[in-house]
Image (cartoon, rainbow, N blue to C red):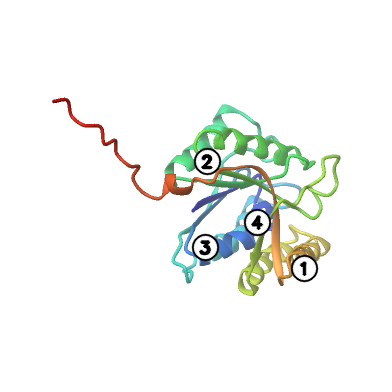
Amino acid sequence: MNILAVGAHPDDVELGCFGTLMEKRAQGHNVFAVALAPGAYGRHSREEIVDAWSRARDILAAPAGGHGRGEYILGMFQIGKLEHSSDVVGFVDSLVTKYKINTIITHHYGEAHQDHVAAQKVAVSAARRKVDSLLLWESSIYTHRNVFPFRAQLYVTISDQAFERKMEVLRSYLAANLLENGEVAAHASLARYRGAEMHRAYAEAFEIVWQVDAGAEGGGERPQSRRKKPG
């Protein structure tokens, strides 16, 4: 698998699906992430945000047991004004092509932040032709505080190590005052809750937009026709 997580800002991918990315990487899959609009906001400078984000980048790229590839990319779009436009869709589409992405994970359509809503639409547009699976992640605040409910349809169980890596990157944002303590604690509890539903220690849940089972189609060359030559 070649998985791309599409987030609006640094910390979105980390909250939504970082445990899953770490788990899939350990299994030998290639995992990529992008934060489309990583600029400064409030009293936080871009440098402070990038410094906290770099911990997640380093962990995602660090050597893993399954030898899968990991890479975290920063976009160049304006925070607070992210748009569902041809420029942004084209940027994500270029990542889909470059990394041969077959699974995209992104924001839920019910999230409230305007950049999150735009990022979700961008991911759908970029996924529409080449991507076999499109999944939406769950956020303790943004997904559960809107009129469109999150529906847990797919569970990815994550190991103790993957869970700890997720918490490590969330704590780096907490230390930089980019996340609140309650939000980090809520995501730890959410992973335990979703795990308990599946009789496991930890899990992350996703809503499925579409999922294609390629089956034998992706497992080698298709059989050639055995039509006899004339005569």
Which residue of the protein is positioned furthest toward the bottom in this rendering?
160
Query: Which callout, 2 or 4, points at the residue further toward the start of the chain?
Result: 4
Tell me residue 110's x, y (percent).
Answer: 78, 41
Determine whether the residue tagged by mark 4 lies in a helix, strand or loop: helix
What's under tag 2, amino acid-wise?
A: Val
Residue topped by disc 2: 131
What's under tag 4, amino acid-wise?
A: Cys
User: Tags 3 and 2 in contact by the CB under 8 Å rule?
Assistant: no
Image point (47%, 63%), residue name: 28
Label 4 crowd bin: few (<14), some (14–19), many (20+), radius 10 Å = many
> Mark 2 and mark 4: span between their CA atoms?
18 Å
Residue 48 at least partly seen: no
* Residue placed most toward the observer, 196 or 219: 219
User: Tags 1 and 4 in contact by the CB under 8 Å rule?
Assistant: no
Query: Which callout, 2 or 1, points at the residue further toward the start of the chain?
Result: 2
Taking 112 as reference, is 32 above or below it? Answer: below
> Mark 3 and mark 1: span between their CA atoms?
23 Å
Tell me residue 38's x, y (percent).
Answer: 63, 47
Query: Which callout, 3 or 2, points at the residue further toward the start of the chain?
Result: 3
Residue topped by disc 3: 25
